[in-house]
């Protein structure tokens, strides 16, 4: 068998292992993880703006200058703390809601990228497995054709069949050799694609654990992540538009400042009469602020936010339609693929039976070589069709699970 090597070890890769590797190694998943981290930081920053803020300060100053009583020199140092809290700021609250909605949307998109990676791995695995299986079928057919050509040659040498039949049988064996060589190239191509998807060393060789019967498509445990992402994007846009309206509402902020300092002022150089500037201070206040004129900027920002909300609403409706239509289409194709597989398996059995009859009739001289070759080709094509039907079942299974949001 052809082998897949990783870190010096040879092993047969299973479908579930391929799916797991694809989710772990997919660059799209890694990119989404980074975007989730960015969105998480934005949401945390927006939330922190709603909470009380505390800062400390320290400073020192030296000043000197004339006044009516003489030259004044002063030195002073001060430390303190300032606490502030936005008691009422609806626009900031709306921005925080929008940030949290965006974070949920990014998390949903991460789940969707994982489901997509799982789908791509299933399709690539099915393609590679099918290519390997076709190669095995053609190799067996090639060996069988070579043996059949020898039997025809024996019949021709005995004068029981025309000499031209030997050439025709040898030509058929050569045709199968050419197909087998082409199949080897297809195995290398599909294996390389699978290895690239899974982040493995790419050498075009893979040994895969056969999937004798594809399982029924799984159901997702929750809403489809693409729909969730579109929903959260719409809600975030709606919150952002509300924030533009609420920016015209007065914002009320409470501030408390406490400080203590040491220092002295000297007049006319007489240190005996220095003025002590040391002491502690405490101040508190409430400030209300509302914008009156923004030179048209507020109107433009509101219009932009309204347009973005409408775009998000259209995107959500589009996503809902696409998911509904895609699910119906994918499930129908999967059912058709399973029915086609059953039909192709029956056709293969019939083709094998027909070849056995054609072989017997040819040996008895009741059929010519063309009928014999046609029966052999029909058997080979039926075997390849069964493999193709298996691949299609795997492909449609992957699509059904993707539109269901399975990851």
Image (spheres, rainbow, N blue to C red):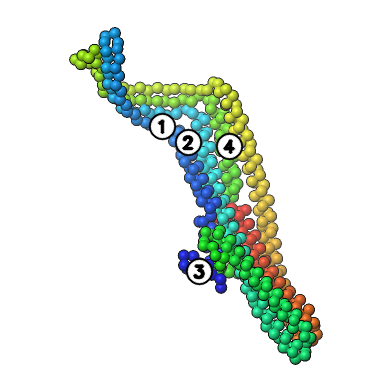
Q: Is residue 236 left or right of residue 171?
A: left
As drawn, the label of residue 35 is none
Residue at the disc numbered 4? 237
Q: Nearer the viewer, mark 2 or mark 1?
A: 2
Quarter of the figure with the N terminus: bottom right
Question: In this rendering, does residue 365 appear at all?
Answer: yes
Q: Nearer the viewer, residue 231 or 164?
A: 164
**Residue under the image location 58 percent in, 35 percent down:** 238
- Check disc 3 and report the residue beneath it: 11
State the residue at coordinates (80%, 83%): 367
Contact, CB < 8 Å: mark 4 with mark 1? no
Q: Is residue 8 above or below residue 23?
A: below
Residue at x 50% of width, y 67% of height:
5
Q: Residue shown at 51%/40% (left/top)?
A: 100
Locate residue 130, reporting x and y percent: 63, 67
Label 3 crowding class (10 Å Cα cut-off): few <14, some 14-19, many 20+? some
Residue 52 numbered mark, or none: 1
Residue 278 visible within the image: no
Q: Position of residue 395 (x, y in %)?
A: 63, 61
> Whole-percent x and y of residue 399?
63, 57
- Whole-number angstrom distance, CA of label 4 to CA of label 1: 26 Å
* Quadrant of the image occupied by residue 3: bottom right
Q: Which residue is mark 2?
A: 46
């Amino acid at each position: 068998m052809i082998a897949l090597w990783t870190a010096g070890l040879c092993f047969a890769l299973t479908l579930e292992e391929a799916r797991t590797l694809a989710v772990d190694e997919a660059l799209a998943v890694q990119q989404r993880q980074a975007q989730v981290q960015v969105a998480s930081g934005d949401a945390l920053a927006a939330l922190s703006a709603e909470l009380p803020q505390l800062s400390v300060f320290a400073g020192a100053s030296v000043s000197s200058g004339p006044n009516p009583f003489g030259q004044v020199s002063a030195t002073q140092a001060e430390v303190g703390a300032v606490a502030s809290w936005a008691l009422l700021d609806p626009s900031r609250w709306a921005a925080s809601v929008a940030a949290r909605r965006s974070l949920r949307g990014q998390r949903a998109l991460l789940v969707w990228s994982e489901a997509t990676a799982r789908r791509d791995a299933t399709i690539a695995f099915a393609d590679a497995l099918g290519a390997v299986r076709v190669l095995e079928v053609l190799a067996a057919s090639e060996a069988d054709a070579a043996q059949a050509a020898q039997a025809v040659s024996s019949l021709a040498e005995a004068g029981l069949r025309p000499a031209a039949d030997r050439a025709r049988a040898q030509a058929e064996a050569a045709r199968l050799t050419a197909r087998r060589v082409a199949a080897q190239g297809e195995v290398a191509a599909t294996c390389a694609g699978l290895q690239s998807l899974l982040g493995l060393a790419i050498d075009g060789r893979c040994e895969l654990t056969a999937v004798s019967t594809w399982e029924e498509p799984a159901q997702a445990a929750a809403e489809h992540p693409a729909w969730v992402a579109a929903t959260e994007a719409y809600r975030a846009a709606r919150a952002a538009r509300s924030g533009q309206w609420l920016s015209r509402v007065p914002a009320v902020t409470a501030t408390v400042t406490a400080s203590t300092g040491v220092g002295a002022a000297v007049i006319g150089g007489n240190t005996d009469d220095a003025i002590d500037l040391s002491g502690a201070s405490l101040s508190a206040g409430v400030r209300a602020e509302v914008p009156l004129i923004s030179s048209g900027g507020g109107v433009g920002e509101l219009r932009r936010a309204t347009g973005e909300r409408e775009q998000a609403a259209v995107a959500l409706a589009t996503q809902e339609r696409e998911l509904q239509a895609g699910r119906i289409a994918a499930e129908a194709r999967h059912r058709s693929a399973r029915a086609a597989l059953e039909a192709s398996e029956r056709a293969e059995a019939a083709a094998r039976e027909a070849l056995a009859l054609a072989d017997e009739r040819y040996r008895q001289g009741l059929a010519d070589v063309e009928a014999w070759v046609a029966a052999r080709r029909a058997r080979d094509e039926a075997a390849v069709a069964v493999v193709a039907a298996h691949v299609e079942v795997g492909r449609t299974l992957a699509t059904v699970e993707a539109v269901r949001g399975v990851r």
